[in-house]
Image (tube, rainbow, N blue to C red):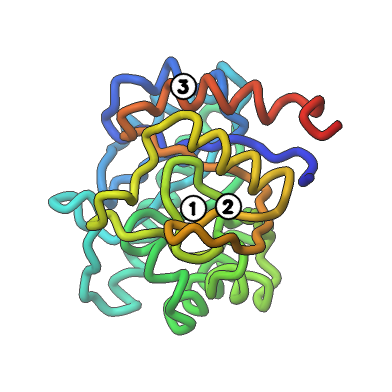
Amino acid sequence: MRENVDLNCDLGEGMANDKAIMPFLGSCNIAAGGHTGDEHTILETIQLAKKHQVKIGAHPSYPDQQNFGRSPVDISFAQLEESLFQQINLVKKLASTENKTMHHIKFHGALYLKSLTSPELAGYLAKFVAHNYKGVQLYAPYGSCMAEEARKQKVPLKNEGFADRAYMTSSVLLSRKNSNAILTNLDEVRHQVLSMVYKGKVPTFDKQSHDIVVDTICIHGDHPKALEIAQLLGPLLATSTLNR
């Protein structure tokens, strides 16, 4: 079992369930304007997190609101860096107005997914975080290029697992283009999370099992059963009785 595995969620994305989900979380990833969100929604989410003592993270993406950050964008590293600065620094600035610190960074959508398998992009992002946000934690899956590059750059890392997505390997999710990519059966969600947290194994779409390490479990705020999953997993991760 991993000690102190927390539940995180992508919030500030225009969903109506943020207030209901927040009490069940240990940390949240706040949309920073790249794929959605603006100063008003960021501050509102920070204030909600503060009320429930939930750790605050920035959730930057490719600058692509039209596609919700879920499609690759062909831009230079310099252009990407400028956008990431704007997004992350806005969350950091607004958090400071509420006397809160930015706990972590979690990249979103296509940027997140590409960093898992591209050593070049992962190396760039790890250096970017190391040089500009010293001490801030990075959320990335165990065994991914992003996790490896974070270790090389000595960026504090939280290995992230997903409650509501099907896996191909321990670090690669099944594409959303596949009809089985999103888990909606709560029993299946529960089984996957318990396996990751307590057994160090993640079941994959092809009925195999892979070694995994998780420090934090993510649910997506736009999942149709996001609140139900939060209500299920919040107490589940908070108790240690299941380890007996």
- State which mark lies toward you, 1 or 2: 2
Q: Is residue 131 above or below residue 29?
A: below
Check contact, mark 3 vs mark 2: CB within 8 A: no
Q: Which residue is mark 2?
A: 160
Question: Which residue is most to the front?
Answer: 207
Alpha-carbon span between mark 3 and mark 2: 19 Å
Question: Does the image show residue 139?
Answer: yes
Q: Earlier in the sequence, mark 3 or mark 1?
A: 3
Helix, strand or loop at mark 3: helix
Q: Position of residue 104 (x, y in %)?
A: 58, 49
Q: In this view of the protein, which residue sits in the foreground, 180 or 18?
A: 180
Q: Is residue 168 above or below residue 33?
A: below
Question: Which residue is most to the bottom?
Answer: 120
Alpha-carbon span between mark 1 and mark 2: 10 Å
Q: In this view of the protein, which residue sits in the foreground, 206 or 111?
A: 206
Would you say 135 lies left or right of 82 here? right
Would you say 232 lies left or right of 72 here? right
Q: Position of residue 73 (x, y in %)?
A: 22, 69
Q: Which residue is mark 1?
A: 106
Helix, strand or loop at mark 2: strand
Residue 31, image quadrant: top left
Q: Residue at x 50, y 25 (%)?
A: 230
Check contact, mark 1 vs mark 2: CB within 8 A: yes
Q: In this view of the protein, which residue sits in the foreground, 23 or 40?
A: 23
The three-letter amino acid code for the residue at tag 2 is Glu
The three-letter amino acid code for the residue at tag 1 is Lys
Q: Position of residue 3 (x, y in %)?
A: 79, 42
The three-letter amino acid code for the residue at tag 3 is Ile
Q: Which mark is residue 21?
A: 3
Q: Residues within 10 Å of mark 1 (few under 14, many from 20)?
A: many
Q: Position of residue 4 (x, y in %)?
A: 76, 38
